[in-house]
Image: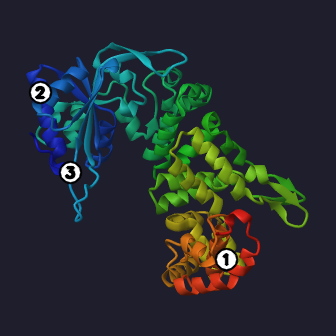
Amino acid sequence: MLVIDYCMTKDQIFKEIYTVSLKTNTDLYIVGGFVRDIILYGHTLLSKDVDFVVLGSGLEFARALDVHLDEAGTLVEFPDFDTARYVFMSEQLQDEHGNDVKREKLLEIEFAGARKEAYQKDSRKPSVTSATLEQDLSRRDFTVNAMALPVHLFVDGLPDDVQILQSVIDPYNGINDLQNKIIKTPLDPDETFSEDPLRMLRAARFASQLGFTIEPKSLASLSTNAYRMSIISKERIQEEFFKLLATKVPSVGLWILYETTLFDQFMPEIKELAGVEEVKGYTHKDNLSHTFAVVDNLAMYTDKVLLRFAALLHDIAKPDTKKFSNTRGWTFDMHEHLGKKMTREICREFKMKRSDIEYVALLVRWHLQPISLMDKGVTDSAVRRLIVNLKDDLSDLLLLCRSDVTTGNQSKKERRLKNYDYLEKRIKEVIEIDALRAFQSPVRGEEIMEICNIKAGPTVGKLKVAIEEAILDGIIPNEYEPAKAYLLSIKDTYLSQLSEREISQ
């Protein structure tokens, strides 16, 4: 069996692919993002995905490669599209306790027969017929992804810039668009976007990812064809949208989605954030601009996409809670509570898994709490409650809160951030003193029933909560003996209110 070493994966695999192409008398070419990135950056060391176009059957070539490599990878076939994916994984390793460590994907290669695609108006699934290489490249999303390089160019290692530019097949002037930092479709954009509407989200994503500008005709076509997003599943939209959120400056793509009405097709709540209202000379900030700025700020702290998504939704309920008060000006009272509900609804629409939904909703619900601690003074009791409610997500919440500081007043910004520095210091101190990470009443339910001579029921729960509240309020330390003593001091008050079914016989 061929052993795959990540440091030599691409060189080795390209040689093996070329060997199989000679054996089977098959022409094939590297296409897509790999070609784009090697022209842009001169290397693709971080890329774990490579696409090949086969002049012939992509599926049959992948099967021949699988035999040649003695099944060194995993072959996944898609016969309806004459496509196959070949995946190389890391070796199965174990940690110091003998437990299996999760295997990593080292390289994923896709082989597709050169094809033309025809789409029905109400479906994203195309009918496929064979085609030439140029016809295949014409169906790609953008000119910068519609270039090809012959595989033999890579058999002796990474080619230099001159070799690449001399060998690249570029029928739609992708190199020129790379040089000018332009996103443009190979064919008429209305045809390209109407056929596969997900490409419109990809246009916004590539603008963010590459720092490119969408050329005017293609940009106008996004608005014209936005309605076509209705044929795309919410799962596919979520996958592509999260790739946009993962870019270095997400707001570039977010503004494109807003200005072209693409957001309206899958997250209409976003457009409601836009605009500034004035009453009696009082205005509020534009919540859309603020929200996008928060996402960009957070992108400087973390690559965690779910956390960036929480930043996008943290003020989502402000339009529905906005009121004007003669004494307070503009208010958005309780927007964090309604925001939690709206966040859950949006995440469910995206078909996200339950744990991810609850994570995002939790951060939206609590994003104002650290600010209120600063306003009221950082007491141990308030810090304890924050720790207990957020648990392992507290550090993410604090990153979100830091990113929520978007004021242009530098002295005010520095003051707010210093407040967070102090709050984080207090959190560490309270955690060390109180051991709150796995917080619960030191006196458990069974012991409460035994001490109080009662059956399981609401009173047991009330007593546990009372002990926990006493710990959070600093009345007693988070230790067994003080907690038991506190239980003995309060139990009679609760026992006097027992229901008959809770009285132990």
Q: Which residue is mark 1?
A: 374
Please identify the residue farthest to the front as the structure is shown: 505
Of residues 42 and 458, the one drawn nearer to the viewer in this rendering: 458
Asked if residue 214 can be seen in this view, the reply is no
Asked if the residue under mark 2 is in contact with the one under mark 3, i.e. CB atoms within 8 Å, the reply is no
Percent across and percent down for residue 186 are 42, 25
Q: Which residue is mark 3?
A: 92
What quarter of the picture does the N terminus occupy? top left
First-in-chain label (2 vs 1): 2
What residue lies at 34% left-to-right and 37% top-to-bottom? 33
Q: Amino acid at mark 1?
A: Met
Element type at mark 2: helix
Percent across and percent down for residue 459 are 68, 69
Q: Is residue 504 left or right of residue 171?
A: right
Mark nearer the viewer, 1 or 3: 3
Number of residues whose C-alpha sits closer than 10 Å to that of mark 2, classed few (under 14), some (14–19) or many (20 or more): many
Please identify the residue farthest to the top as the structure is shown: 129
Mark nearer the viewer, 3 or 2: 3
Q: Is residue 271 left or right of residue 430?
A: right
